[in-house]
Image: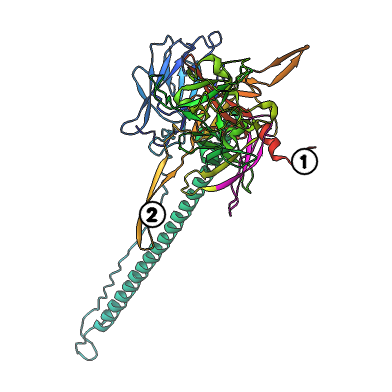
Amino acid sequence: MSNDGIERIIIRHVNGSKANQIEQISLGDLTEITIGRDPSSTIAFDSPRDDVVSRRHAVIRVVREPHISFRLADLGSSNGTFLNGERITDELELLPDDAIGLGKNGVKLIFDVQPRPSSLASRTRLIDVGDAAATRVIKTAEIAASMAANDAVTKTNIGADTGTGKFEPPPKTGVGKETVLHLLGEERRATSRIWIASLAGFAAFVALGGAFFYWKHAHDQQELQTQNQRLKDDLSRRQAGLESKTDEQFGLSSQDIVKQFGNATAQISTSWRLYDQTTGKPVFHQTFRDHERRSKDLYTYPAYVRMPNNVVVRWLTLEDDNRTNIPIGERLQGTGFVVSEHGFILTNKHVAAPWNLAFGQSDPANDSRFGWLYEIGGGPGAKDPKLRYPTRIDLADEDYSSLKAWAPASGGLVFVKNMALFPNGVEGNIPDPSKGGTHTFFGRDDVLEVRFANSRVSAAANLARVSSESDAALIKVDTPQLLNKLEIASDDDVTVGEKVIALGYPSVARSAIAFNSTIENGQIRKNEDIVPLPFVSEGIVALVSPAAKTENGITMVGLSGDMIQLSINSTGAGNSGGPVFNKAGKVIGLFTYGISRGGANTSGAVPIKYGRDLLQSQHP
């Protein structure tokens, strides 16, 4: 299925209730555009003001084979559908700049597409040309040639000379032979000169005429090129003005966002671990099996302990001799965006420093669902400090929901290793929070890398700052080049219903794989590199939820904190920390989470003000 490069359909309203408005409809996989007063119509009109329009008046159908085209058809309307002033009875082809009329002298629309492919040109505009003027006849003066011939015949009387009596011939009259031949030669030469002069004049005329016509043709071509260039410039100005008005009314498209800002949005890969502040050792979650076979379940489960105050905690340890304990840490993938050409990148705190947040949702121990629960001294209030034999618990039970609220950076109790194997044995296994049994922990990114769009190379990054108020963090990547950066909004003006676009690298998105072969130390190596491709999602602001708002003496607190709720539901894990743009192309938030409840899907973003705070070293 091909759209021949067309991204959207433009409908310009000439009159009616929507006069001077422009509607932009994304083409995508669209098959038809319905027109009418029915609210479900793609192009819907106001019932009271546009009563000449039927509820289902007309339809524009999209035909994609062999080339994309558009066809206009009437849907049995009361007042008819007109194409360029002519009422249609059949389905007719619709071209850019065509005028669609809904009723005679009724609502008028102008149809167009952007960008306009070469296969879809406007109709030829016909111009009425008047009768050509009659050929003007120029009368030529008649040339009268008069020719007169005078034959002079000299008659001589012939008679006897009375004096001599001799006969004398009369004297010769006329022209001699030589004279005649001379005159004929002169006439021929004169005639030749006339012919030569005539031919020379004709040749000169032809040459001058050819030069004139050549000059005239070149002049006309130059004039035509000048006119064409003026028309092109005028069309470009008009198109630029239309695009500017379209961008102002509808904002940047998803394609514009990806094209302009995709290379400033990076995929972030992290792997973090939790460490004990005193010893520097990594922290583990202890696991056990039912070694005494008191249960039919012989699986290995994470261990939990119910303290004397009835609080259930994780059995944390600094040892892992059998390589069966669960490390406190995880691997994550998220998104970030460049806010400084020198390498500073904004992202979510749960991507770059997740040990500062509740660990319950990402705890690897959740994979088992079940756990072993050990009671201290047989239960609350018991004096026996020993551990009793464990019972298997379901971690999904509401009694253990408090475990999900634990933040690793807040510290915890560390138990002696493997004491659970001897539930009735060694004392002193139970740490006492009142006597310094609580350890201080710190988190660290063992791996923190960023990879930009369409790149095969990852760059190491470092954690720079973490917000104490919201799910936002700032990281720094060292790079020899200046990076393209995004422009973040300078205010917090976010309106419910406004268009938003999110960029990121969710796990549901397909990435490209680059294959290549290299020769190193005489060995051929085949390499495969993941090339991230930015994933774009479009929606609107569904709800703006402030952390707290006081009005008329009443304080309202948002259950999700200071958050922008979005209608975007096509993305997911991996998009966390990605930029959320408004229609002007400015970042108004950091995409943070997605929620699915009762078949409904929504998502949320942290307001960009928390990102701006991380960029300021000094506050006014």
> In the rendered image, is residue 202 in sight?
yes
Q: Nearer the viewer, residue 453 or 15?
A: 453
Question: Mark 2: which amino acid?
Answer: Glu
Residue holding disc 2: 142
Number of dots carrying numbers: 2
Q: Is residue 198 above or below residue 559?
A: below
What residue lies at 66% left-to-right and 24% top-to-bottom?
562
> Badge 2: how crowded within 10 Å, few (<14), some, or many (20+)?
few
In percent of width and height, residue 328 lies at: 54, 34
Question: Mark 1: which amino acid?
Answer: Gln
Magenta-tinted stretch: 460-489
Secondary structure of the residue carrying tag 2 is: loop
In percent of width and height, residue 335 lies at: 54, 37
Q: Nearer the viewer, residue 253 or 266?
A: 266
Q: Quadrant of the N terminus?
A: top left
What residue lies at 53% left-to-right and 9% top-to-bottom?
47
> In the rendered image, is residue 348 in sight?
no
Q: Quadrant of residue 546?
A: top right
Q: Is residue 94 above or below residue 188?
A: above
In percent of width and height, residue 199 lies at: 34, 67
Residue holding disc 1: 618
Q: Quadrant of residue 336?
A: top right
Q: Could you tell whether 387 is left or right of 508 in the image? A: right
Q: Mark 1 or 2 closer to N-term?
A: 2
